[in-house]
């Protein structure tokens, strides 16, 4: 996928209703077995499906007593449960500052996935024109 395709797919998934929205970590697993995602966790899920990174379920989060998912785990590198890895940032075009912005919208401002998708569309507006 090129960056345009990644961003468009991310926005589509944020609006799909297929992902439960959560806070504070990219993905955590609820007692009922369903996952809750930060908006950036949805982006990381796309990266896993595209084979860019791997993911690993941690039995207990260092922040609370629920299992969380770390993304970007390798044999020599721990993954990340708060922000996408540098590799995902470069692949998607969602740089560190944008990651922080979207995480703040999700976790602190409690914006919905649809509201965050609107902001992503504004930030990447050339990707949403017909000729792009």
Image (cartoon, rainbow, N blue to C red):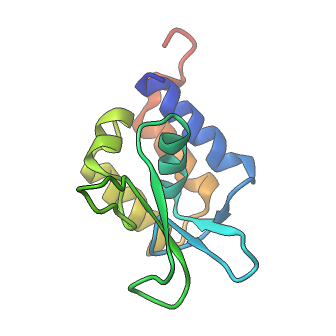
- In the rendered view, tell whether residue 58 sits above or below residue 127: below
| Residue 110, image x, y percentages | 53, 72
Q: How many marks?
A: 0
| Residue 84, image x, y percentages | 36, 53
For image coordinates 71% across by 69% down, the residue present is: 34
- In the rendered view, tell whether residue 44 sits above or below residue 83: above
For image coordinates 76% across by 79% down, the residue present is: 32
| Residue 19, image x, y percentages | 68, 57
For image coordinates 47% across by 49% down, the residue present is: 44
- Kindly give the residue lying farthest to the top in the view shown: 131
Looking at the image, residue 90 sits to the left or right of residue 31; the answer is: left
For image coordinates 52% across by 63% down, the residue present is: 38
- Seen from the viewer's position, the closer of residues 98 and 6 is 6
- In the rendered view, tell whether residue 14 sits above or below residue 108: above
- Kindly give the residue lying farthest to the front in the view shown: 75
| Residue 49, image x, y percentages | 56, 39
- Seen from the viewer's position, the closer of residues 122 and 103 is 103
- Seen from the viewer's position, the closer of residues 115 and 93 is 93
């Amino acid at each position: 996928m090129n960056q345009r395709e990644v961003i468009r797919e991310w926005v589509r998934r944020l609006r799909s209703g297929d992902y439960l929205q959560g806070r504070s970590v990219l993905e955590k697993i609820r007692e009922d077995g369903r996952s809750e995602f930060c908006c950036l966790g949805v982006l990381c899920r796309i990266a896993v499906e595209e084979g860019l990174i791997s993911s690993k379920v941690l039995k207990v989060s260092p922040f609370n007593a629920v299992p969380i998912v770390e993304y970007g785990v390798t044999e020599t590198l721990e993954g990340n449960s708060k922000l996408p890895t540098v590799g995902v940032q470069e692949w998607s075009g969602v740089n560190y500052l944008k990651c922080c912005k979207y995480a703040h919208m999700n976790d602190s401002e409690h914006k919905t996935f649809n509201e965050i998708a609107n902001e992503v569309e504004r930030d990447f507006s050339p990707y949403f024109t017909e000729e792009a």
